[in-house]
Image (cartoon, rainbow, N blue to C red):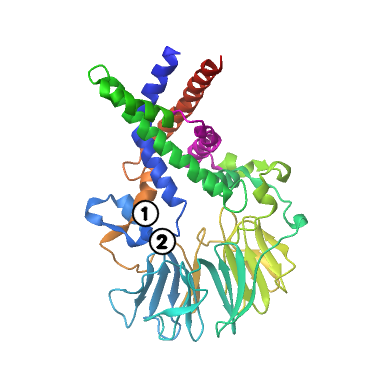
Amino acid sequence: MFRLKKVHKYAGVLSGIVLILLSISGFFLNHDNWKFLYGTTLPNSILPQETIDKDKRLYNTYYVDKEDTSHTLFCGFKGIDVRKDNAHAYVRTLDTPCYTMVVSTRYYSATTEGIYVSDDKGLSWKPFALNGEVITALSLDADKLLAVIDKKTLVLIDTHANILHADEVKLKKEELKHDISLGRLVRDVHYGRGLFDDGLSLLWNDFATLWLILLATTGYVLWYMIGKIRRKKSYKKPIGLLLKVHTSSWVLMAVIPLILLVVTGIFLDHSKFFSSFLHQTKVPHAVLPPVYSSLKEDIWSADIHKGVYRIGNRYGVYRSNDLKSWHLESKGFAYKIMHDEADVYVSGMGSSNRVFKQNSWKILDNTPHMFKSIYSEVEVKKYFASSTKGVLLPASSSTTLYSVLLSIHDGTFFASWWVFVNDFVSVLLLVLLYTGLRLWYRRVKRKFI
């Protein structure tokens, strides 16, 4: 037991600070629709370039006015930025985080506070429909809008803001019996969406990360106070209280999610190295967690085109003609679905980009992975992604808190080699869990003998 205590103490001392940083950053990253993550910024002068560059990921839609190509807009989690009349700088016209934007005679944006509309080409915005709701996807076809509330509820609205249909998508069980890659499962579990429905996966992850913060904090305080106990007897009472928290049985509920976070996190830290293994290893549907048999909170994208409705989830593109009966039309994670006058485009996440053209699906070669919108320049179709070159992004002297937390979580904030520090600390967390459980069991066993 003495050795177990020693191992537990030194593993905690070595890993505690990094575990707190990983837990805090991971907790907030799991809730990426919280507005303050994008409204709070830090000056670029104190941040590494790797962190500053992560802000490029926050742009979701790039729009070029066909009639006036000097008029361009960006919709993203920092808001909506407009550049007009060949101006050198963009002007922020909406501060609310924006998931996507669609355009006809009016401009509509899907935001974390409902759908907004602009009648002056994005220069000013006003609430249009579903006020206060997190709108994660939006599509426009003639006089109808198809919106998704928080990846769960599908809403059909006319251009007068009248709701024509609002309901969850209920996919038949036979449409959900598909195998997935191990890489997909690893990502889903780590990001809090790979086990159960109704937000329970994310809640379990939150519970685990908050307990880890508490355990690491109380562990450091105990380590400091126990070292002083011989000189200050007054420390005995607070030490007893801290020990009750640190050794609480509630920690048992956090053990399994913490182990899952550690294992999946190591795989993701080295996703390029494990890429072939993760992609080629298939997980049969029969052994998948319950969430894969419903995916009712997994509508990543939606599209309405020529009266046909489509939604995209981690299995692929599902099609319906009546918003009631759905069938799988194209396999592969459909991150974004969008259309132009003639065709429907799908941006894949860990799957191929493709286009529905002339009544059949075709692979889109030489297009960026996970592109976010399509636009035209000199009648040439182009695809906007975070890595797209030649697109003038809005200039900024500061970086969002979200990007700072992301770079802390993946280690790039500190150095390119910091990922190995994260790996080392992850292994130490497994040691802490093992030794902590052994010590807890011995303590409980003595209590009842």
Instruction: Tell me the distance, in whole angstroms, between the alpha carbons under discs 2 and 1.
Output: 9 Å
Looking at the image, residue 399 lies above or below residue 217: below
**For this view, does 291 lie left or right of residue 372?**
right
Residue 58's disc number: 2
Residue with the mark numbered 1: 403
Residue 447's disc number: none
Q: Which of 406 and 268 is in front in this view?
A: 406
**Residue type highlighted by circle 2:** Leu
In the rendered image, residue 386, in percent from the top left (x then y), is placed at 43, 60
Magenta residue check for 316:
no
Secondary element at tag 1: helix
The stretch in magenta equals 247-275
**For this view, does 57 lie left or right of residue 141?**
left
Q: Which residue: 36% across, 60% down?
A: 36
- Identify the mark nearer the N-term, 2 or 1: 2
Q: Which residue: 31% across, 59% down?
A: 40
Q: Which residue: 61% across, 45% down?
A: 195
In the rendered image, residue 248, in percent from the top left (x then y), is placed at 47, 31
- For label 2, the crowd category at 10 Å Cα-Cα, with few meaning under 14, some 14 to 19 and many 20 or more, is many
The quadrant of the picture occupied by the N terminus is top left
Q: Which of 445 and 119 is in front in this view?
A: 445
